[in-house]
Amino acid sequence: MSNISVTSEVGTLKRLLVHSPDSGLGKVVPSKAQDWLFEDIVHLETIRKNEYDYYTKILLYFLDPEKIKGKLAEIDSEANDRAFYKPENDQFFKSDKVIELQWLLAEILEDANIKTELVSSVCAIEGCTYLTQKILLQYTAKELAKTFVSGTSSEKQLLFAPIPNFIFTRDIGITINNYVLLNKPAKKARTREALLAKYIFFNHPLFADYKDNIIELSDSQYSFLLPKEDDDKKVTLEGGDIMVVSDKHLLVGVSERTSSEAAVKITNTMFEKGIVDKVTIVKIPKKRDYMHIDTVFTQVKRNVWVMLGNFSRKAVKHEDENAIERILEIKKEEKIKILQFHKKCPDNPISFDSLEDLLIDISKTDLHCEEEVKIIFSGNNEFPYSAREQWTDSCNLLALKEGVVLGYDRNDKTTQAFKDNGFSVIYAKDLIAQLEARTMDVNTITDTVILMPSAELSRARGGFHCMSMPLLREGL
């Protein structure tokens, strides 16, 4: 089986990269939360035990059931002390389907040369002392990997800032067919993430056959001379702005985190290397509300999408609106610009008036859907729920297979919209109990939204699409 191949957003998921919440999340302080791209401080133990652990279990049941089926009582026992979830522990689940980034990092650090290079690189960008650099070289590979991610030494000292966004593995890179496009983060808080990811992809045996297929975007000529205000001329990219909707068609977002210059470079690279034939650039407002394109829409099935109504042909419904109010609201809606470039004629792009039009075209033209294309709206397209629930990632869903997606349990109106469109809804806790009791089989689950607990995870502004980097999906 190939290690890397992603040709759609909804093909059955077979392998992905994740990162379990580490102690660094528990060190985010209010004064630094915005700098570290969090909306609020989070409670680490709640995220770990009551939220993210459900995510890990669901992924293992679907992708690597041998690691978990029949073992829940032992895994969740107090005596186990979460060893099953801790990559530095000998009892860690260590799946080759649900792959932990920290574990990969520890494995490449067993190489003395890589260890020396990466310690030097991290210490340089973090401004560490020469003595600290010497001390870090004495750490075991597992200790060093944990320190690089959490910022905390084996002696419990904070050597440098944590990288709490490492749980959002989508943003370190994206798999496009059998290529990997690495990120260039817009925010300084994510610089160390990009460095660690680069070393993992270029040095871990898992990716040994794909070294020539790893793409890094270089900075534009003279970019270092540009003023700070001219951000769009700089090359910045995060994986949440890339979607592989078919083996021939790539979506690229231009957003708060991904620049127009990056979109140009990606498009040219895709065409030059013959990776895809069509690139659609989706330019959304540069607002914290949206961040990436996968915060305003994701795919559920070939013919089903979930999206924010602001970018639809339809106006968001208000409970007591009249015709004049509705027209004024339409006038106020923020603009989205969509241009589709084709390899054969890149100087003659096609434009789309709304995001809805683009999604329908993808389903019909690229995925050859004959059924009606359904658009499910955040908050059921009702004000104020549309904006409230988009903020807590109602549009940021991860497809485990076509029609079966993971989302947050707090987005009630969006959940109801799924029900109204024929989807079943089940809570993660109930699903896990049924899978463990063998009263349900993952192979028979269809058209279902799996609701995950989300009181703390949602504070970090990222859903399960963000918390995953698919490496392998079955073709549609």
Image (tube, helix red, strand yellow):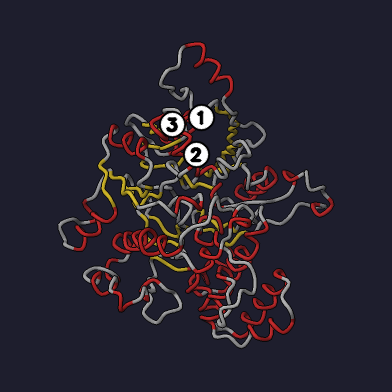
Q: Label 2, on which residue?
A: 296
Q: Residues within 10 Å of mark 3 (few under 14, many from 20)?
A: many
Q: Label 1, on which residue?
A: 310
**Which sits in the foreground, 89 or 385?**
385
Outermost residue on the bottom side: it is 138
Element carrying mark 3:
helix
Q: x, y percentage for residue 352? A: 55, 28
Circle nearer the N terminus (1, 2): 2
From mark 1 to mark 3, how far is it between C-alphas? 16 Å
Q: Residue at x 25, y 69 (%)?
A: 72
- Quadrant hosting residue 51: bottom left
Q: Label 3, on which residue?
A: 360
From mark 3 to mark 2, how far is it between C-alphas? 15 Å
Q: Residues within 10 Å of mark 2 (few under 14, many from 20)?
A: many
Circle nearer the N terminus (3, 2): 2
Q: x, y percentage for residue 81? A: 35, 76
Q: x, y percentage for residue 237? A: 63, 51
From mark 1 to mark 2, how far is it between C-alphas? 9 Å
Circle nearer the N terminus (1, 3): 1
Q: Residues within 10 Å of mark 1 (few under 14, many from 20)?
A: many
Name the amino acid, label 3: Ile
Element carrying mark 1:
helix
Q: x, y percentage for residue 79? A: 30, 79
**Which sits in the foreground, 159 or 373?**
159
Name the amino acid, label 2: Val
Foreground: disc 1 or disc 3: 1
Element carrying mark 2:
loop
**Which sits in the foreground, 109 or 11?**
109
